[in-house]
Amino acid sequence: MNLDASLNADLHCHSVVSDGTLTPEALAERAKAGGVDLWSLTDHDEIGGQARALAAARAAGLPYLTGTEISVSFAGRVVHIVGLGFDHGAEEMAEGLRATRGGREARAREMAAGLAEVGIPGAFEGALKYVGNPELISRTHFARFLVDAGHCTDVPEVFRRFLTEGKPGFVPHKWAALKDAVGWITRAGGIAVIAHPGRYDFTPTEEYALITEFIGHGGRGIEVVTGSHTVAEYAKYADTAVEFGLLASRGSDFHSPDESRVDLGTLQPLPGKLTPVWAELADRIHR
């Protein structure tokens, strides 16, 4: 397998283990059918689906990197850090992610109470039908409930009207520290990557602070081509990767056939001037 920037790698997607709608097994089949050459399942704050994803990838003949996406509090916003190529049996990471997930149920019940105040009762029980485990309940599950119950026509409308700062149902959560998230990943033998940097609406000063602090803690990569970036942002973050000496990553951020902007395997390739993160993880690829 050629590990240059032209590889059709998809190193960012989600299953039912967090807030996706497909199983790890179905995602492996979809990635293979979509022409993906190297795949990673990166469920939010969770590595419980890694064994299933690895087994499914092997059954499909699809090279695989372990993955997760960790929620981090930084400069008053939630930033996501993807971890790739780590030992998914590492106890420190598992414990850290358990602590990060802790409090989701209490937060979700507060979110439901906020929605009840504006005439939407039963939101906690409704959202729980889409996840099954209160430890993993998220805004996405509430969004699916609000759409299916007829309160909104689609998920984007949900986040225009509810569940965001200043709107009904919004409740902040204290996530992991950037230093801790990067540390869990690197000490487990993986590489930490800033996920979809174009989504955070940082000022240039805030973005510089994020990147430099991330590097200072041992972070080494940044997503350049991802489902939520525009073509202009592909170019911007390619330049950022070069400027800061970061490895470049690529992933669809696929959640659902009905909700995601980009399907597995359909992204543009990384610009050839970049060093892809997978070139540094060749010995961690499961085949």
Image (cartoon, rainbow, N blue to C red):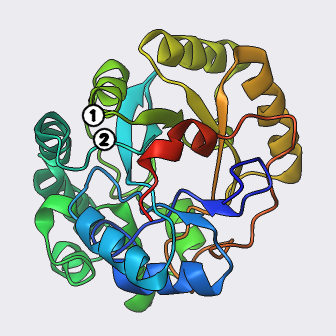
Residue 164 position, x and y percent, is 45, 51
> Is 278 or 207 nearer to us in this picture?
278
Q: Residue at x 37, y 26 (%)?
A: 182
SS class of the residue under badge 2?
A: loop
Q: Earlier in the sequence, mark 2 or mark 1?
A: 2
Q: In this image, 175 relative to 29: left or right?
A: left
Residue with the mark numbered 1: 188
SS class of the residue under badge 1?
A: loop
Disc 2 + disc 1, Cβ < 8 Å: no
Specify the amino acid type for callout 1. Answer: Ala
Q: In this image, 282 relative to 81: left or right?
A: right
Residue with the mark numbered 2: 172
Q: Residue at x 25, y 34 (%)?
A: 174
Q: In this image, 220 relative to 262: left or right?
A: left
Q: Residue at x 37, y 33 (%)?
A: 72
Residue 63 position, x and y percent, is 51, 66
Residue 37 position, x and y percent, is 63, 68
Image position of 243 with respect to 134: above or below: above
Q: Label 2 crowding class (10 Å Cα cut-off): few <14, some 14-19, many 20+?
A: some
Residue 176 position, x and y percent, is 27, 31
Tell me the CA gap for discs 2 and 1: 29 Å
Image position of 60 with respect to 48: above or below: below
Q: Nearer the viewer, mark 2 or mark 1?
A: 1
Q: In this image, 142 relative to 264: left or right?
A: left
Specify the amino acid type for callout 2. Answer: Pro
